[in-house]
Image (tube, rainbow, N blue to C red):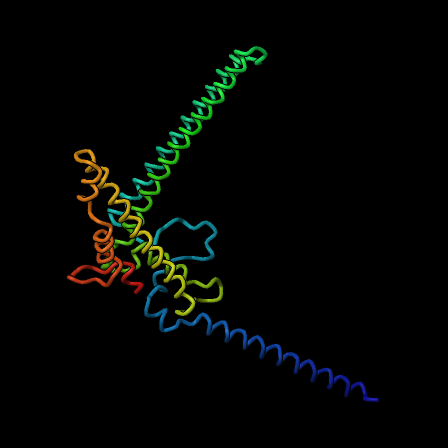
Amino acid sequence: MASWADQFKAAKKEMQQAFEKAEAEENRKIKETDEAKELSPWLRRVGCIPHLASIDSEDDEPEFRPLYVLTKAQQLAMQTVRDKIGAFQEWKEEQAKSVEGEDCDEDEGFDDGEDGEGVEGVKGAAEEVDEGFKDEMSKETKWMQQIQQEVLRFCITLLDHPLQDNEYQSPIISGLAVLMIKGDKGWHDAKDFTTKYSAVIKLARLMVVQEAYEQRQEQIRTYQSEMTEVEARKKATSYYWLVKQFVAQFTTMAHGGRDPTPMQWIY
């Protein structure tokens, strides 16, 4: 049987080995974390780190300080969206008050429907309610279409943002910089982030097509006040030329002395 001293030495040796193993494991984790957080050449090239340096992740009550800078066109488009939404909300409130007033009137003149006239009256009232509901839904749909059009116009101004002194003044590029953060694990690499770039590009193309459609329809409506629909459609700019104009303006590489745009920066 080993003596107490030998047992103590063996236990001490085991403790030392366990400590060294734990320390090695911790050092390995720290190294892996540092490597994950280390800036890749791609991150250095895109330059998003200095742009996000002013954000304090430990600030419990951060003050809203946008890192981007809106152009005058973007500010006007955003204000138009807000005004349109505000007008829609006022319309909804008026509709709600109107319905409440009609409900009170109906309660005061309620008929139990025991005679034929009462039954017919209830049916007629029900039909009027259905017609009124359909009319209200139609107006609400028109309101939503107008709001969607203004939101689209605002998005188009974001795409048509000239990049001059600092590309991160663009809301699109500033937002992409935030998406590069990989939680507490560092940063996304170029391979991981390609899918996000691809999604932004596809969405931009869809918005370009939709804006071309909206502009042509708007031209047709304007011309129809002076000519027939057939003539108006012939005179309005075609979808092809509208899309070609937008593509050349802010979805392909800049040329002719123009400043680049966010989509061109992504490419």
Residue 91 visible in the picture: yes
Q: Is residue 93 above or below residue 255?
A: above
Q: Is residue 203 above or below residue 7?
A: above
Residue 194 location, quadrant = bottom left
In percent of width and height, residue 49 lies at 37, 64
Name the residue at 25% across, 41% down.
218
* Image quadrant containing the N terminus: bottom right
Q: Which sits in the foreground, 220 or 9?
A: 220
Could you tell whether 182 is left or right of 9 in the image?
A: left
In percent of width and height, residue 134 lies at 42, 29
Q: Which sits in the foreground, 71 or 6?
A: 71
Could you tell whether 106 is left or right of 53 in the image?
A: right
Q: How many marks overall?
A: 0
Residue 53 visible in the picture: no
Name the residue at 45% across, 49% down.
61
In percent of width and height, residue 238 lies at 21, 49
Q: Residue furthest right?
A: 1
Q: Which sits in the foreground, 150 or 111?
A: 111
Q: Is residue 29 above or below residue 87?
A: below
* Image quadrant containing the C terminus: bottom left
Name the residue at 38% across, 29% down.
91
In percent of width and height, residue 34 lies at 47, 73
